Amino acid sequence: MDRIDEMEKEIDSKACMYGYKVLVVCLVVWSVIEASKYWFDFGEMNLLPFFILNSALYVQELTKMYMIKKMVDGDEEYKQPKSLSNKIKVVRAIIWSVLSIAVILKLISDYMF
């Protein structure tokens, strides 16, 4: 098995970053289009892009929080403060995830039946 060197890791990391940014921009544009449909009475608003966008952003934030916590565990020099905002982010992400799954399942059941 070939080992990936630092340059290839950097290239993969940048490619993922650019792909993620393009995905987020597309979801933002789609969300604005769906919201403008509702605001200007052109039809019903599809909530799917909102839920996908927010779910992706919450997963990114929670992953970042987890990785930072994992990196500083056992380090005597750096102690990460236990802030209320981190707990609020986790609770908000859990609620949003459950709500997103419920709405997606409802949309799927509406299209199938």
Image: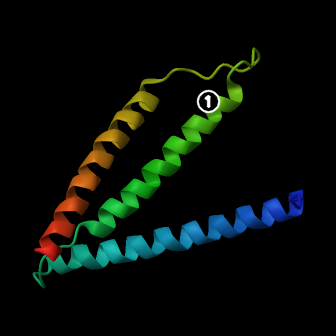
Quadrant in which the N terminus appears: bottom right
Would residue 27 be found to the left or right of residue 69 on screen? left
**Horizontal and vertical percent position of residue 53:** 39, 62
Residue 8's place in the image compared with 34, above or below, is above
**Horizontal and vertical percent position of residue 50:** 31, 64
**Horizontal and vertical percent position of residue 75:** 75, 19
For image coordinates 57% across by 36% down, the residue present is 66
Extreme residue toward the top, this view? 76
Comparing 28 with 102, the one in front is 102
For image coordinates 38% across by 76% down, the residue present is 29
Q: Quadrant of residue 3?
A: bottom right
Extreme residue toward the front, this view? 1
Q: Quadrant of residue 70?
A: top right
Would residue 70 be found to the left or right of residue 33 on screen? right
* Residue at numbered disc 1: 69
Amino acid type of disc 1?
Lys
For image coordinates 40% across by 71% down, the residue present is 27
Q: Secondary structure at mark 1?
A: helix
Q: Quadrant of residue 57?
A: bottom left
Q: Dot 1 surroundings within 10 Å: few (below 14), some, or many (20 or more)?
A: few
Comparing 102 with 85, the one in front is 102
Would residue 26 be found to the left or right of residue 92 on screen? right
Residue 74's place in the image compared with 40, above or below, is above
Residue 33's place in the image compared with 70, above or below, is below
**Horizontal and vertical percent position of residue 55:** 39, 55
Comparing 91 with 39, the one in front is 91
For image coordinates 34% across by 40% down, the residue present is 94
Quadrant in which the C terminus appears: bottom left
Residue 88's place in the image compared with 36, above or below, is above
Would residue 68 be found to the left or right of residue 25 on screen? right
